Each structure stands twice: as C-alpha cells, then as structure tokens.
Image: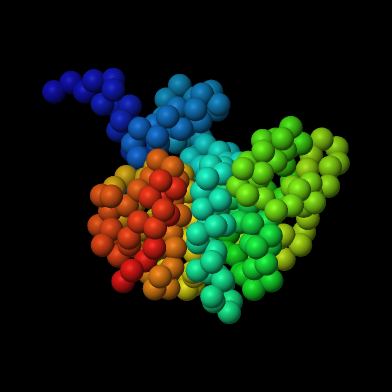
C-alpha cells in the first residue's frame, strides 16, 4: 500500500525524535503531537532542511545543532508575574499556610529563562519569607538555565513585568529589584542567592526533594496524557501533605490519574492542595 506524504512526514518526525533520544538522551517522544510537529517545522525551516529526515541527519552529525534544537523543543515563552491573579492568590491565600513552616522549599519545574522563579522570589521576599525559602529551578534546556541564572531581560519587557507585579499585589516597586544597563534590566543577585539551578527532566528523572510548593505552569500543555500523569506523579511525591501545586491557566488535574491526591484550593487560578 502506498504511503501518503503526510504519513511519510509523520514517520520522519517520529524517527527524528527517536534519534534525538538515542543520541543525546533528551526524550520528547511523549510530547503532544501537534505541539511537537509545530516546533519541529519551525526548526526544519530555520535550518533550511527540505524534510525531517534531512534535519535528523543534521542533528545526528553536528552536535552544535542540538542546543538550537532544544530552543525549539522546550517552552521558552514566559513573563514575570504572568497571570497576576495567580500570584495574588498565592500571596493572599497560599502564603498564610506556608508561613506556618519554619523553612520552605519551592520547586519551579520547567523554569525556562527564569521569569517565574524571580516572580516567586520577589513575592516571597515582600511577604517576609525570602530568607527561609530555598528555591529549586529546573529545566532540561542548559541554555535556558544559563539565562535564568543570569537574570538579564530586555528593558522593553519591563513595563509589562511592572504592570503584572502591581496587579499581583506587589508591595514594593519592581524597579527596586533590577538595574538598567545597555538596553537590559539586570535583576539583583540577591534574588537568586537561595536558588539551586539544576537540569531535571519531567520525562525521565525522579523526585529529588520534599517541597511545600510546586509551580509548573504552562508546561503540561505540551505533554501527552501519559507524560502529564508522570509529571503530576512526581509533583505528588515531592509535595508534603497539605502542600500546594500551581498549574497554568489552561491546565488542570481533571483527567489526571493522580487527581484523587489533590483537592482544588483556588480553582480559577489552577492551584491545588495535596490531601493524601
């Protein structure tokens, strides 16, 4: 039976993803098919390849291409205090619970270039919890982790960050936390002095710490159902009893195999509390 062009392209795509896994041990095999294809089409066009097979040959034989490929395959879209209502709810409803712990650990899973991490660091500092909180910022993309650790963002993004911070209930001026230089905003190093930046894959790695809060926002939407369940299972096993899980605005635990371990705490803001 003759294979259609679409079927051939699908085979090529799956072989490309398998090749990246076997050669470099980055596993995108259980990412959402639609999202994966969209990102790989962008990569194919960027490298001027006629097909996914040609892109596969390039990736396999030129290791320098891999970091750029990871930029296409991993989530790179973020902003500080994105969805301010989420952070306002953390501030007003979740932190009063977290304040009862003598020390805190927070896991920012899929931290990308660090905007969410710094949002949390500022929020916890404003609420007097900065000095007793340890943050774990993890991602599979080494370049994203380097950007996160540097804490340097384009100055033209700051007005949006500032507006979000104000709407999140900010108790200070965002300008207190950065200096402007050469068209960039450089965040104060003190914001990351209690942060561990680390490579960690929700696809293949295990639980590494017990935490009171997990923030993994706008990451699960790129996974298929099985991989979503694996990630939520990691979050469940990481969280202390009565710990909190924050997801993105388009994500929920409604269909998760681990839903029974959580109860909605702030349903509209996608914040859940571990109950078992």
Q: Give the left or right position of residue 238, taking residue 261 as reference.
A: right
Q: Give the left or right position of residue 241, taking residue 78 as reference.
A: left
Q: At x 65% / y 45%, what residue is drawn?
A: 165
User: Residue lying furthest left in this view?
Assistant: 1
**Looking at the picture, does residue 173 appear above or below residue 137?**
above
Q: At x 85% / y 37%, what residue is drawn?
A: 182
Quadrant in the picture for the C terminus: bottom left
Quadrant in the picture for the N terminus: top left
Q: At x 67% / y 38%, what residue is drawn?
A: 163
Across and down, in percent, residue 208 comes to 48, 71
Quarter of image, res 64: top right
Q: Give the left or right position of residue 268, taking residue 90 as reference.
A: left
**Looking at the picture, does residue 7 appear above or below residue 184?**
above
Q: At x 66% / y 44%, what residue is drawn?
A: 166
Q: Is residue 139 visible?
A: no
User: Residue lying furthest bottom in this view?
Assistant: 102
């Amino acid at each position: 039976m003759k294979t259609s062009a679409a079927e051939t392209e699908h085979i090529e795509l799956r072989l490309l993803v398998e090749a990246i896994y076997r050669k470099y041990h980055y596993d995108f095999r259980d990412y959402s098919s639609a999202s994966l294809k969209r990102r790989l089409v962008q990569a194919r066009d960027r490298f001027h390849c006629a097909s996914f097979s040609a892109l596969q040959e390039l990736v396999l034989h030129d290791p320098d291409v891999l970091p750029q490929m990871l930029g296409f395959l991993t989530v790179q879209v973020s902003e500080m205090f994105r969805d301010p209502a989420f952070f306002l709810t953390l501030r007003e409803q979740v932190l009063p619970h977290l304040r009862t712990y003598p020390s805190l650990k927070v896991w920012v899973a899929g931290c990308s270039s660090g905007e969410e991490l710094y949002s949390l660091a500022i929020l916890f500092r404003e609420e007097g919890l900065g000095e007793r909180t340890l943050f774990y910022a993890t991602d599979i993309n080494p370049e994203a982790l380097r950007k996160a650790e540097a804490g340097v963002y384009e100055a033209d993004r700051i007005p949006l960050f500032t507006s979000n911070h104000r709407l999140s209930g900010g108790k200070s001026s965002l300008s207190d936390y950065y200096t402007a230089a050469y068209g960039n905003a450089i965040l104060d190093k003190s914001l990351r002095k209690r942060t561990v930046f680390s490579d960690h894959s929700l696809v293949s790695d295990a639980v590494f710490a017990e935490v009171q809060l997990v923030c993994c926002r706008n990451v699960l939407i790129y996974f298929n159902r099985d991989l979503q369940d694996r990630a939520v299972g990691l979050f469940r096993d990481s969280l202390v009893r009565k710990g909190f899980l924050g997801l993105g605005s388009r994500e929920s635990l409604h269909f998760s195999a681990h839903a029974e371990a959580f109860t909605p705490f702030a349903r509209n803001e996608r914040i859940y509390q571990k109950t078992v």
